[in-house]
Image (cartoon, rainbow, N blue to C red):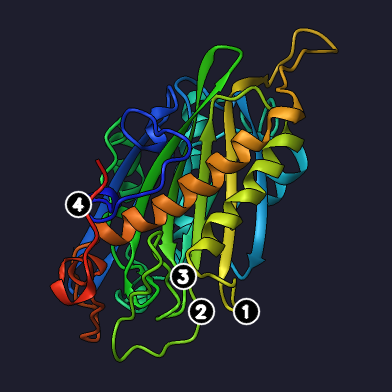
Amino acid sequence: MRLRDHIALPGHLPTGPRNSVTDVPGVQVGHATIQGGGLNTGVTAILPAPGNLFEHKLTAAVEVINGFGKSAGLVQVAELGSLETPILLTNTFGVGTCANALIRRAIAESPDIGRGTSTVNPVVCECNDGTLSDIQAMAVTEDDARRALAAAGPQVAEGSVGAGTGMVAFGFKGGIGTASRRIDLDGGAHLLGALVLANFGRAGDLILPDGRRPDPAGRAEAEKGSVIVVLATDLPVDQRQLARICRRAGAGLARLGAFYGNGSGDIVLGFTTHNRIPHRPAADMGQVDRMADTRIDLAFRAACEATEEAVLNALCAATAVTGWNGAVRPLLSDWLNSPKNGRSPPHQ
């Protein structure tokens, strides 16, 4: 189940055909889920484009809303404006392991990495799933990262899967969610999609698009989680424009009731498949396509709307898990389906 199975949404920008980050041509997503023995964790892989990403990099940007996080690779992405590996999402203690898997993958594709040419910048982002998983078990392996990469395809499973298996958001079970928006420029359609790892928000603060405020009874936890937002697009934008678009994902989080607490790691990573960057350029200069700034409000709205809906899709799709210490979190879908909460008609 997704958000639109429960709530009638106001009409703004249209979605892509799947309402998913994989509506952006070439983008694929896969998961490796680890459960049992007190574990509810895993890896989610985002393949931004086909082919050798090290040799043909993607234009990329980062927006750090609140930096309570342990991600890898973001400093170089922010400095150089390029992405040269797939993106892996996992738990906090799995970052180094996943980075190693990405390095080995890149070396297998380009054997001169670190010897005949520069090193590679693996990008891994994380959230802490220690509430519902035994994070000290250090359960994520390089094989799990490779499984997630190998499983990547156009259909995106949501909720309690992959990196989202043990996540909590607004006091409810959180996880992986995705959504997309279509933008029309000069008679052609472009896509912007969001994939989120939702593990943030204080219980009782969630605001639904119809104005209702679900409150998981008995949960008075402080805001100390995190959220990773990955924005993918095929828009012709440069790094500066992409960074501005990433910043607007924060508006989607704020609509939900987030205030970016002291202990929350709120990070947005964006890339476009349009302006590729060759590792070995044939000339001293190259051309970059760039949309007019006078039209960029469309992309700003798309980032806001897709991020908001992706988080709510994560919450609606989540399934129940029991944590290593017996901890559980309620499901937003149960709250929405309860007659006492005044269910609104689904989106048509």
Image x and y of residue 9, in percent = 36, 49
- Callout 4: few (<14), some (14-19), or many (20+) C-alpha neighbours within 10 Å? some
Q: CA distance from mark 1 to mark 2?
A: 7 Å
Residue corresponding to mark 3: 200
Tell whether label 2 touches label 1 (CB within 8 Å). yes
Where disc 4 sits, the SS reads loop
Q: Is residue 347 left or right of residue 279?
A: left
Residue corresponding to mark 1: 262
Residue corresponding to mark 4: 1
Q: Residue at x 53, y 30 (%)?
A: 233
Tell whether label 2 touches label 4 (CB within 8 Å). no
Where disc 3 sits, the SS reads loop
Q: Is residue 121 left or right of residue 348?
A: right
Q: Nearer the viewer, residue 56 or 19?
A: 19
Is residue 160 visible to the viewer in this orientation of the structure?
no
- Callout 1: few (<14), some (14-19), or many (20+) C-alpha neighbours within 10 Å? few
> Is 316 drawn above or below residue 201 in the view shown?
above
